[in-house]
Image (cartoon, helix red, strand yellow):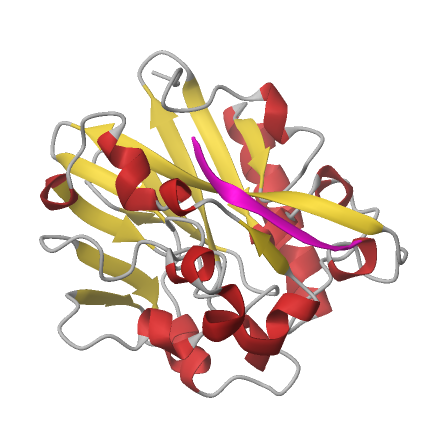
Amino acid sequence: MFQTGTLKTKTKYVKMNKGEETYEIPVPWYLIKHPQGNVVIDGGTAIEAAIDKRGHWGSVVDVYDPIMALSENCVDQLKMVDVAPHDIRFVLQSHLHLDHTGALGRFPKAQYLVQRAEYDYAFKPHWFSAGAYIRADFDRPGLNWKFLGGDFTDNYDLFGDGTVRLIFTPGHSPGHQSFLITLPKTGPVLLTIDAAYTVDHWENRALPGLVVSSGKAADSVAKLRRIASDTGAMVVTGHDPDTWPSFRKAPYDFYD
């Protein structure tokens, strides 16, 4: 579990209609070491936001202000655990919002997996979602994309051994996906990503501050709760500032 800094925002932009107070949230991303190849999930915020956040994100920084050191980019953080860019086989995109696209184009031998619905929407989002997509992050010639589904693909088994499953969880965005990771000792770990930003979303006390469909967002949480119940998975929500500190963090600790 890694983190590319934080986003400083207001509570209402994370928990719909919940207040004007300042709310600072972590920006997690993940590395999975598998016998068949290393996997990065999302990669957090792109390094360009650390170099010139307003130049890269524009007016979005007035709502979501990225607080990120240059060294917190995913490539440099991977070097801290002796993983080089050419060592990554897959990059899994939960979705293509600006705080989840830090890995795109950084790993020359990687295949990049995303739901087709998400990729298509990113180029022509609704007006209310447009600020969440930074085209320069994902519109990159020469990337080895693998698009899942015509409409969508659910429960995609990356290695065919059940260790990494991609769970279709739309609502926050049209092609959002979460991840069920089964580790040898720890067991199942459910990464909700932005299907549930926080425990408030997970426990049905709030909707995410940004959704394309509130109904689908609620259905996706219900789906993930069933999976967690059936598997006994450890649940990791997407951006919860209260629970995130309790997890083991790279480069000093990890789950096995």
Name the residue located 39 percent from the left edge and 18 percent from the top edge.
255
Q: Position of residue 143 (x, y in %)?
A: 17, 68
Q: Position of residue 219 (x, y in %)?
A: 66, 57
Q: Would residue 116 be seen by someone viewing this image from the given angle?
A: no
> What is the span of residues highlighted in magenta in the rendered image?
1-10
Quarter of the rendering containing residue 188: top left
* 1 sits left or right of 199 in the view: left
110 inside magenta stretch: no
Pick the residue in front: 217 or 85: 85
Regarding residue 11, the answer to whether it shows in the image is: yes
Quarter that holds the N terminus: top left
Residue located 65% across and 61% down the image: 64
Q: Does residue 179 appear to the left or right of 149 in the view shown? A: right
Residue at 81% across / 50% down in the picture?
Answer: 22
Q: Is residue 7 magenta?
A: yes
Residue that extends furthest to the top in the rendered view of this protein: 185
Q: Nearer the viewer, residue 185 or 112?
A: 112
Q: Of helix, strand and loop, which mostly describes the magenta segment?
A: strand
Q: Splitting the image into 4 quarters, where does residue 226 fall?
A: top right
Q: Position of residue 101 (x, y in %)?
A: 39, 60
